[in-house]
Image (cartoon, rainbow, N blue to C red):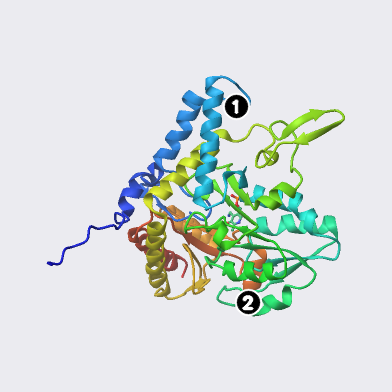
Amino acid sequence: MPATTPPSTAAPAFDPEAIRADFPALDQTVYDDAPLVYLDNAATSQKPQVVIDRMNAYYARENSNVHRGVHALSQGASEAYEQARETLARFIHAPDPDTVVWTKGTTDGLNLIASSFGPTVVDEGDEILLTEMEHHANIVPWQMLAERTGASIRVLPITDTGELRLDRLDDLLSEQTALVAISHVSNALGTVNPIDAIIDAAHAQGVPVVVDGAQSAPHRPVDVQAMDADFFVFSGHKMFGPTGIGVMYGKRKHLEAMPPYQGGGDMIDRVSFEGTTYDDIPHKFEAGTPNISGAIALGTAAEYILNVGRDEMHAYESDLLDYATRRLEAIEGLRLIGTAEEKTSVLSFVLDDVHPYDAGTFLDRLGIAVRTGNHCTEPLMDRLGLPGTIRASLAGYNTRADVDALVEGIRKTQDLFG
Ligand code: PMP
């Protein structure tokens, strides 16, 4: 039989230029006609036109409160709001949309867990295990919980390259450990933490694990069931969605056992002065009028990423990160901070004789938007002995031309300050 070519089943190639064209904010100049090079995606990403249009359409035609009215607009809004929840459940492979709770973002989700779940597992004398690379949002709520309960904080250290010291895990995961809270991907270093190994080790001791997915959900496929996370939280605005909306996924058994976080309308079953019963999950955690347009538009953002192809975008970003790493490494007087084996989309660096703030300010005048400072990771900066870093962070719409512009900008910065 003659050999035949099998039909191609490959997804269409990832096209960053086509993606770019979907984001109106990328097509602008700043200051003296400097084309914007947006490399601050770890702080917040830009939004595609479909997300902007979805928000506008909601307010133009569909605006109404959810779960309350019998009228057409309210029913339509409720349906769109719940459909978005289903999309987000699919986005992280949650077993069921009821395990997806809308929050204001990662910070809000972590505070919810610390306030509501925290006291159910953490007692006086217990330990909460964090890591040296955590964002303040994954430190302070646990410190507040420790203060309330009489527990203490333990910290898993990192190596000089920015990887977790797994060799210390056995030591630190002790009889006293009541909870582990850890970032999936570091916002300051880009390190991808071996989350499966840490969750397995914690679960072997019966310890629940809270995962801060703020920097992973936007960039790589996430499967909360395969990971077996007890909680997984992330923000909409870092994944092409609006600000003020995010997700807290929790295992059903935890969500059902946890007390509500806030009381009010929409989270109750029946209220009387003698006592109140609460609604089922997820509504038990969603008191008051929620961010309806934000949730619906976050659903659109998640669909957008799923349509582009999550694996494809991840592969593209990894290739771009490799390219950027090679180009930055070649610059004399530049030191990359965070050189872990496995990284996602973040390039933190310092320049000899140039304060990060000066570098960031000068790059900004060239149209290059980067972040400078401690990136809300002061304990990490203390560990590294740095006042801060310059951070360029990538998204699927960035290109090699953006990286080349950054390299050129760094050279000019060094010329000016050197
Ligand atoms: N955790 C990490 C790892 C982050 O990068 C961020 C945002 N910089 C947060 C938590 C807090 O996210 P948000 O400000 O959206 O609540």
Pointers 1 and 2 in contact (CB under 8 A)?
Answer: no
Q: CA distance from mark 1 to mark 2?
A: 48 Å
Picture quadrant of ligand 1: bottom right
The residue mark sitting in front, 1 or 2, is 1
Can residue 376 be seen in this snapshot? no
The disc labelled 1 sits on which kind of residue?
A: Asn
What residue is shown at x 45% (from left), y 29% (from top)? 57
Q: What quarter of the picture does the N terminus occupy?
A: bottom left
Asked where in the image residue 279 lies, by quadrant, the reply is top right
Nearest to N terminus: mark 1 or mark 2: 1
What residue is shown at x 69% (from left), y 52% (from top)? 253
Residue 205: horizontal and vertical position, in percent? Answer: 72, 70
Name the side, left or right, on which 105 lies relative to 297: right
Q: Is residue 366 shown above or below 417?
A: above
The disc labelled 2 sits on which kind of residue?
A: Arg
What residue is shown at x 70% (from left), y 77% (from top)? 170
Q: Is residue 103 shown above or below 209?
A: above
Residue 312: horizontal and vertical position, in percent? Answer: 37, 58
Between residues 263 and 269, which one lies in front from this camera angle? Answer: 269
Between residues 378 and 94, which one lies in front from this camera angle? Answer: 94
Q: Secondary structure at mark 1?
A: loop
What residue is shown at x 39% (from left), y 44% (from top)? 23
What residue did someone put label 1 on? 65
Question: For the view shown, which residue lies furthest in the left direction?
Answer: 2
Q: Is residue 66 shown above or below 325?
A: above
Residue 219: horizontal and vertical position, in percent? Answer: 47, 57
| Circle number at residue 165 | 2
